[in-house]
Amino acid sequence: MNRFVKYTIGLLLGLILLIAVFSGGFVVGHFMQIPVLDALPFQSVPLVKPAGADSATPDSLQAVFKPFWETWALVHKEYVDQPVDDIKLMRGAISGMLASLGDLHTSYMDPSQYTQANTQLSGEYDGIGAWVDAQGDYLTIVSPMSHSPAEKAGLKAGDKVIKVDGSDMTGTPADLVIQKVMGKAGTIVKLTILRQGQDPFDVDVTRAHITIPSVESKMLDNNIAYVKLNTFGDKSTAEMVAAIKELLAKNPKGLIFDLRNNGGGYLNTAVEVASQFIKEGLIVSEKYGDGSKDQKFDAIPGGIATDIPMVVLVNEGSASASEIVAGALQDYGRAKLVGVTTYGKGSVQIWTPLTDNAGAVRITVAKWFTPKDRSIHKVGLTPDVEVKLTKEDFDAGRDPQLDAAIKTLLEMLK
């Protein structure tokens, strides 16, 4: 495979990748004393490196990697269940190496995870078509996509996936559960669902090719336009521009731009999106460790909605590219933010695929700053109007954050 680098500041499935890092870090950091069942004399094990190990390890690192190859040899000679899986050992070693940096956004993606991450940003995949929450004990349906297999099968917001094809998902990392739920279009996956107030039940869902909608738009009461952006992917800018043009043709008084639960995506898409609302000036700056490759990204001329009064909805799921756009709009006083404090991901990663389709690594290379030189990393953006959305609100179909956004916009229009 030709080597290429993708700039990304997304979570993409950001939550999925974060979970993989969290669980990997726990395994690496967990310490346990080993009980000795029989008092055996110590036996030295001759070091047997795999063929080519010396030639693959640079001379300057032979001493550094000596313990690694000793461990590799010990596992192959002494581990109880043989043969061991060399691919799994290799991937575990890479994951542990990156986890040791202590950066949640620097991590290894195995081939499946890398494919999924790119799929989400490309906007198409094979699966059941549902937005999911990967932070709880079980993978939870946030909402089925319109006209999707998940919707047709009767899945609802709040449904927890406790089994996939009869296999218990208790304690299974969410990224692995998602892999099991996804699959070739036309095949059937049996999900065991736990729904509040009901006993667990099975649902057969026929997978299909899913096209993820980047943008949702509509007119609200009081002649207010509403646009929700779900991701910053390949097609997001074009789809958003088309939606805004259609709404502007109806002469709205103001615009609500919804970035809630948008985990980010491509840096260039973030700049393109922000440029639709900001006429000129700095959108975001990148600062590298040694300062040698610092960059500034200015607004792209020709934005189509640079004058309409607007409010931006944000929450704890608004991250990265979402924070770049919201931060720039807030810094320039172009829009007020309504909701709760954002996630706080102020770093930039490159995704580099490994040779022979062995997955990819994403490495934090820089931190980004708003036009007013604010770093939001691990802090987030504080909304101008703070409004929480409780589980009770969600279950009842209420959206006090959207209500507050409408109220704020109407007050601005006065």
Image (spheres, rainbow, N blue to C red):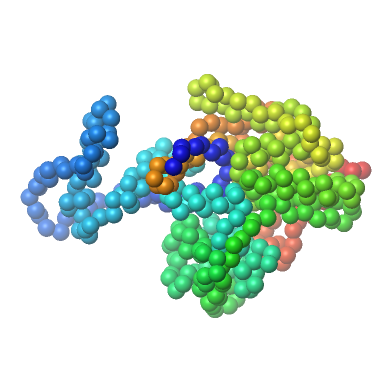
Query: Whole-percent x and y of residue 17?
Result: 49, 49
Q: Is residue 222 above or below residue 234?
A: below
Of residue 315 and residue 321, the one placed in the foreground of this image is 321
Residue at screen point 20% across, 55% down: 79
Which residue is most to the right?
Answer: 414
Residue at screen point 72% across, 45% down: 238
* Side of 163 relative to 123 (left or right): left
Q: Is residue 303 visible?
A: yes
* Side of 16 relative to 260 (left or right): left
Q: For residue 83, what is the image quadrant?
A: bottom left
Residue at screen point 54% across, 57% down: 134
Q: For residue 222, what is the image quadrant?
A: bottom right
Query: Whole-percent x and y of residue 169?
Result: 45, 66
* Side of 98 relative to 327 (left or right): left
Query: Whole-percent x and y of residue 147?
Result: 68, 67
| Position of the N terminus by quadrant | top left
